[in-house]
Amino acid sequence: MNTVIKVEQLSKAYQLGQFNTGTISQDLNRWWAHVRGKEDPFLKVGEKNDRTTKGKSNVVWSLKDVNLEIQQGDAIGIVGKNGAGKSTLLKILSRVTSPTQGTVKIKGRIASLLEVGTGFHPELSGRENIFLNGAILGMRKKEIERKFDEIVDFSGVERYIDTPVKRYSSGMYVRLAFAVAAHLESEILIVDEVLAVGDAEFQKKCLGKMQQVSKGEGRTVLFVSHNLSAIKQLCSKGAYLRDGELISVGTSEETVIQYLSYHQKKGIGDIYVKPAPEGKDLELMRAEIFDHDGVHRKQFEITESISIDLTIRCVKKIPSVYGYIVVKNRQEDILIESDSNDLLPNRLEQITEGDNVFRVVIPSKVLPYGEYRFYISFASSFSDSYSVDVPGEILNFTIVDTLTQRGHTRRSKTSSLLQWELKNALT
Amino acid sequence: MSQDNTQVPSGQQWDVVIEPHYRLFHINFKEVYRYRDLLGLIVKRDFVASYKQTVLGPLWFFIQPLFTMVMYTFIFGKLAGFSTDGLPKPLFYLVGITTWNYFSETLNKTANVFKDNASIFGKVYFPRLIMPLSIVVSNLVKFGVQFLLLCFVMLYYAASGTVFSPSLYLVLFPFVVVLMAAQGLGFGMIVSAMTTKYRDLVFLVTFGVQLAMYATPVIYPFSSVPQQYQWMIALNPMTAIVEVSRKGLLGHGYFDIQMFVSCIIFTVSILLIGIVVFNKVEKNFVDTI
C-alpha cells in the first residue's frame, strides 16, 4: 500500500480567552524561553480539551499526539463530537494553520473543502465566481476553462450564470460553490461537513459525486460529518477523535459503532447501539431504522413503510416474555402502542439463546408528518426472577409529506389517503 | 497499478511536509508563481466589484485626484501661498498626489490584509503572499490610470504654452514606481504581521500615513524647506521618490545621488524584512486574529 498522508505526533494548542492585556508580557516570556532554548512555558500547563469543564489553564490541546497513516484510495470518515479536534485536524492538513508539535507528510495535491464558496464575491456573476473560486482552490485558469461546462452542468444554475451571485437563492449559491470544488483535480480531497446545506436532492448528488471521486477515481478522501449514515455509506475507514485524541482507526462501521456507544446517552438517532452488555437475561444490543430497500434513513415520506431492526441478545430464556413499543410525537401524543402479544403468536417467546434480529414494520400511511420518538421495553409476568432490559426512547425519525398536494397542511391524525371512485354515472 | 510496486518503503518522496516551525527564509516562490492566475483574478475582481452598481464607474479613478488637486491648488497654493518651484500649481500638486496616493494606498491595504481576508485565509490554503502582491498590482493599475490623467493635464499645459520640460531623469521614473510599490508593500507587510495580535497599530498607521504626507514634499518642494530641517525631510524614503518623479516629469525637482541610493538600500531592506515577517506570521495568524 502507498501511504499518501502520514501524521506523526501531531498536537495543536490553542489559547483561550481574550488576547488583550497580558499578551505582551506573555509573548515576552515565551520569546525569552525560546531564546534560552527552553520549552514554551505556557504550553506545559496545557490540558485536555474538554469544553464542558472549566480548566485551570487557558491553553488547551485541541489535538494531542495524533498518529495516523492514510493510504492511497482510502475514504476515511472522521467522527467525534463538536470540539473533538476534527476540524483542527483538517485545518492543519489543508495548511490553513500550522501544528504546535509534530509533522504531517503529504504526497500529492490536496484540495480542501472546509467551506463551500470561500472567496465568492456577491457582486460578481456566477461565471466570474467560478473562475475566482477555482483559482482560490488552486486550479489554473486553463483547467477551469476546460471544466467550465461540466461545472455549470453539475450546479444546475445555467440560467443564472451571468447574474451576480448576491441575487442567488442560498441553495443555488451552495450548488454552484460545491460544483466548483467537486471538479478539482487533486489526489486528496478533504471535506468538512459541507453537506449540511442544500436540499435532500442536492445532498444526494454531492454524496454521489464524492462516492465517484473515492471509489470510481481511486482518490483519497477525508470526510468529516455528523451524518453517520453518510460516513458509513461513503467511507471504507473511520477514525474516531475524542477530546483531541485519536481513539481508534478501523472500518467506518466499527468506528461509527464505537462513537455511538460512547455518546449514546447524549442523544438518540437512527441507530442505537448498546455500549456494553449489562449482563441481563434479555438485552437489546442494537436497533436501526431502514426504509423498505434496506437503506438507513431518518426521514420518510408518508407513503413509505418504516422498518426497525432489533438485535436482541438472549442469555437465558424467559417464560412469557414480551416486547412493548410506543411511538410518540413531539406533543407527547401516543400514536402507536403495541406489544408483541397483540398479534399472536408472540415471536419473542420463541427466542433462542444468542443474538436474534427481529423486524418491526410501521406500515405506510399511518403516521402523519412530524417528528417521532420510538420507545421500547421488555417485560414478563415472571420478571421478578429474571432481569429484562428497558432501553427506553432509543430512536427517532421524521415523517414528511412532500408528495401529495395538501402536504403539511393536512390536519389528519393519521396519514390515510382516501380513494375516490366513480360508482356509477347518472346521466 | 504497476507504479505502486516502484515505491520505496523508506525515504519516500513527500510533496508537502507540514511542521510547527520553518526556517526564517522558507519562502516558496515557486508556489507563488504557480498561483499567478489567482493573482490576476483577484486584481480583476477588485476592479469589477468596486464599480458595480455605480453610475460613473471607473471615472471615480479620475475624480478623486482631480478634486484633491483643485483643493490643494486653492488652499496650499492660493491661500497659504506655498512655493511650487515656479511650476504650474495644479501640475505640481498632481504629480505629488499621484505618487503619494499609490504609496499610501498600497501601504494601508497591505497593512489590513490579514484582517480583510481572515475569512478566506481561515478556510483555504494558497500562498498568502498572493494577497499583498495583488494589492500592489491593483493599485498599480489604478496608478496607471491616474498617470494618464496626469499626462492629459501636462498636455493641456504644454498646449497653452506654459514652460515645463520633462528631463532626462524621466528614464528613472519606471524604477521609481517600483521603489514606491516595494516601500508600500514592505511597510504594509510589517504592519500587517504585527496587527494580527495587536490591533492598535491599525489606528496608528491609518492616521500616521496621513501625517507622513506632510513630511514628504507633496505639497511643497524640497528646495523650499529651510536648510536646518532638510536633513529630516531627506531621511524620509519617499522624499527622493516624489522629487525624482517631479524632476523627470516636469523638469524641476531635487536629485541627490546619495539620497537616491540610500532610498534604494532602505527600500530593499524594508521589503525583505516585510516578506520574512509576513511569512512567519501567515502560518498561524488564523488562531489569533
Image (cartoon, grey):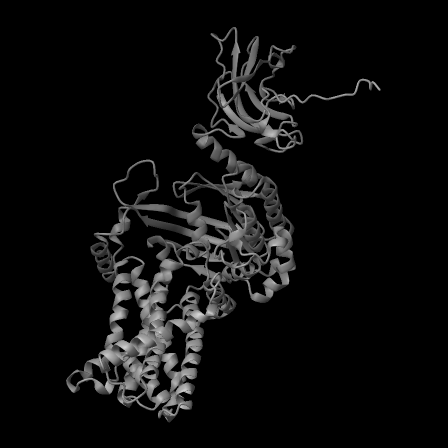
Residue at the extreme right of the image, as rendered: A427
What residue is shown at x 48% (from left), y 8% (from top)? A385
The percent position of residue A34, horizontal first and vertical second, equals 26, 60
User: Is B44 located above or below residue B258 in the figure?
Assistant: above
Closer to us: A73 or A88: A88
What residue is shown at x 48% (from left), y 13% (from top)? A387
User: Is A115 located above or below residue A129 in the figure?
Assistant: above
The percent position of residue B253, horizontal first and vertical second, equals 30, 88
What residue is shown at x 65% (from left), y 10% (from top)? A344
Task: Tell me if residue B80 can be seen.
Answer: yes
Is residue A212 shown left or right of residue B285? right
The percent position of residue A21, horizontal first and vertical second, equals 21, 52
Is residue A279 shown left or right of residue B191? right
Closer to us: A48 or A294: A294
Closer to us: A111 or A199: A199
User: Is B61 located above or below residue A166 in the figure?
Assistant: below
Is residue B117 shown left or right of residue A297? left
